[in-house]
């Protein structure tokens, strides 16, 4: 396919490179980053979108997504698909989809799970909202960039799935870090803790796949000084999106709200900015009930 790719940052660049390596003709644009090998460079987002069968965006927030959509939709050919892989609020996703559909385009919101490592390896999971025809068009691209794509329903439902998933992730990572810190204080060896919990009812992805304790379980950012695979700053963004969505839907999410408040403190008042979201463990190691 002929593909336009807007947003070539830590996630977008490897995704675009994988598409190019698979034989697709990819033209990219980013306001800062140069395109990766195999991806042609456009002078603007509109230029990257012109003539493309699918235009993929990977952008920081809903406001930027709407601005970019305003630039690229008029440049896109009739029947093309606008495939947004950013993580943004549900309202922005649905607004952009409506803009695209009004212009005779297909539209998908398809946020991802898997982090930078998954983007590089082509093992992302896509949570997709939008029409069935647009999903069918994009499916071969999902198969290159990821290991799974789940069609979650109409526009905005991909973002809804991502927000709910990451609210669970934020809460379970905090609980996992709290439990390791408590185990330390009780004199329980971390490997023994892992061996029990990873095969018991406390098991979670945060424990068995992304363990926050260095040297325990599969290799994770904790083994690399908590350099981010998924930054605490991004977890805070997603938790805030979950709470905005909960407020709009009148949903009671007390654990999600507490997780958002704790990550806000960690990132904005402590040393969490720029660290992996699992760096909550060293935070709890040094704290007492009074601190």
Image: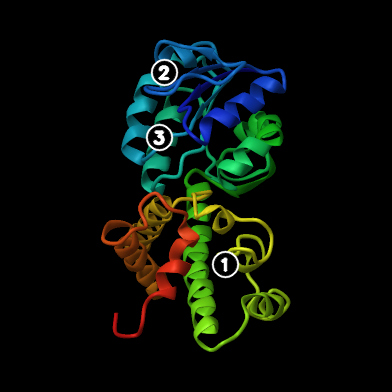
Mark 1 or mark 2, earlier in chain: 2
> What is the number of the mark on residue 213?
1
Quarter location, residue 196: bottom right
Which residue in the structure is indicated by mark 2?
A: 45
Image colouring: rainbow
CB contact under 8 Å: marks 3 and 1: no
Q: Residue at x 61, y 25 (%)?
A: 17
Q: Position of residue 26 (x, y in %)?
A: 59, 17
Q: Are marks 2 and 3 in contact (CB under 8 Å)?
A: no
Q: Quadrant of the C terminus?
A: bottom left
Look at the numbered disc 2 and give the secondary structure of its residue. helix
- Asked whether residue 107 is in view, the answer is no
Q: List x then y, in percent, for residue 184.
A: 53, 81
Residue at x 54%, y 41% (from the top left corner): 110
* SS type, badge 1: loop
> Mark 2: few, some, or many residues within 10 Å (few <14, many ≥20)?
many
State the image coordinates of residue 174 (x, y, percent, origin top left). Answer: 47, 70
Q: Which mark is residue 61?
A: none
Q: Which residue is mark 3?
A: 96
Q: Secondary structure at mark 3?
A: helix
Residue at 56 percent of width and 87 percent of height: 187
The quadrant of the rendering that contains the N terminus is: top right
- Alpha carbon of mark 2 to alpha carbon of mark 3: how far? 16 Å
- Left or right, 1 with respect to 158, comes to right
Mark 3 or mark 1, earlier in chain = 3
């Amino acid at each position: 396919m002929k593909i336009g790719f807007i947003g070539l940052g830590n996630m977008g660049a490897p995704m675009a490179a994988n598409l190019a390596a698979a034989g697709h003709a990819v033209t990219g644009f980013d306001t800062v980053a140069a395109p990766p090998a195999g991806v042609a460079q456009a002078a603007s987002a509109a230029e990257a979108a012109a003539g493309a069968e699918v235009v993929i965006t990977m952008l920081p927030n809903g406001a930027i997504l709407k601005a970019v959509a305003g630039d690229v939709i008029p440049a896109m050919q009739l029947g093309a698909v606008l495939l947004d892989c950013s993580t943004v609020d549900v309202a922005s996703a649905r607004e952009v989809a409506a803009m695209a559909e009004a212009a005779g385009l297909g539209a998908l919101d398809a946020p991802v799970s898997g982090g930078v490592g998954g983007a590089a390896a082509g093992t992302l999971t896509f949570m997709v909202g939008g029409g069935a025809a647009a999903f069918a068009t994009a499916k071969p691209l999902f198969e290159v960039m990821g290991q799974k794509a789940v069609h979650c329903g109409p526009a905005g439902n991909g973002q809804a799935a991502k927000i709910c998933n990451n609210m669970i992730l934020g809460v379970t990572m905090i609980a996992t870090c709290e439990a390791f810190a408590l185990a330390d204080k009780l004199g329980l060896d971390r490997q023994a803790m892992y061996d029990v919990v990873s095969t018991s009812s406390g098991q979670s992805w945060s424990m068995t796949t992304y363990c926050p304790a260095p040297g325990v379980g599969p290799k994770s950012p904790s083994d690399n000084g908590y350099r981010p695979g998924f930054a605490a700053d991004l977890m805070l963004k997603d938790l805030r999106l979950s709470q905005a969505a909960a407020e709009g839907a009148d949903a009671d999410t007390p654990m999600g709200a507490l997780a958002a408040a704790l990550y806000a403190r960690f990132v904005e008042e402590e040393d969490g900015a720029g660290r992996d979201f699992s760096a909550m463990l060293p935070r709890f190691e040094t704290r007492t009930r009074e601190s």
